[in-house]
Image (spheres, helix red, strand yellow):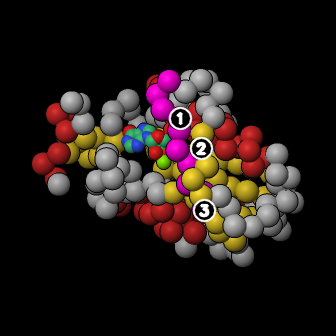
Amino acid sequence: MRQAIKKVLVTSEEINARIKELGDQITKDYQGKDLMLVGILKGAVIFMSELMKNIDMPIMMDFMAVSSYGKSSKPTGAVRIIKDLESSIEDKDILIIEDIIDTGLTLSYLVDNLEKRGASSVKICTLLDKPDRRRTDVPVHYRGFLVPDEFIVGYGLDYAEQYRNLPFVAALKEEFYRK
Ligand code: IMP
Ligand code: MG
């Protein structure tokens, strides 16, 4: 597995330290609110489980799974919901937990979709942000790390369902993803 790695971009230690900071900030910002974390499967699973241990207040959690309609998708970024939330989010404060924001199309669709269900607020917390490829403006309220325009794997992020279990964030060598 490790021979496919071009460069480690963020180490486990750096990730853990940053997640603690994010958890502290979220705990402060959401005092007295009805916070629900919505994790986007599958990439956000490791980040979300680590983050929630660092949020020191009562929270709820749920998951969604989405898939984009392919590379030709319009800038409206319609995505297909593969697994929807189990409960109503009306009057709840929603924090979407994502692994990486790339073009931003997935999240701008999701924010809109969750706002329409009557949530009190919908904000975004992403482990990684790849701003070079952004195609639509999406407000990033909590961000772990900025990453360069590389193919990123590890800490939940995959290439063809592989590498999610790497405990750090790394760039994949081109010969492993360019056909
Ligand atoms: P967006 O709609 O382009 O922002 O797509 C975001 C989704 O694409 C993320 O949730 C990831 O699943 C996937 N993605 C984007 N960039 C990468 C990457 O570098 N490595 C792995 N997955 C990525
Ligand atoms: Mg994802």
Residue 144 in the image: above or below residue 166: above
Q: Residue at x 48, y 32 (%)?
A: 70
Crowding near pointer 3: few (<14 within 10 Å), some, many (20+)? Answer: some
Q: CA distance from mark 3 to mark 2?
A: 14 Å
Residue 123 in the image: above or below residue 104: below
Our reading of the magenta stretch's main secondary structure is: strand
Give percent across and percent down for residue 156. 40, 56
Q: Nearer the viewer, residue 117 or 50?
A: 117
Q: Residue at x 59, y 58 (%)?
A: 83
Secondary-structure class at tag 1: loop
The residue to which callout 2 is attached is 80
The residue to which callout 3 is attached is 63
Indicate the amino acid at tag 2.
Answer: Arg
Quadrant housing the C terminus: top left
> Does 71 appear in magenta?
yes
The residue to which callout 1 is attached is 69
Crowding near pointer 1: few (<14 within 10 Å), some, many (20+)? Answer: few
Give percent across and percent down for residue 94. 73, 56
Indicate the amino acid at tag 1.
Answer: Tyr
In front of the other: label 3 or label 1?
1
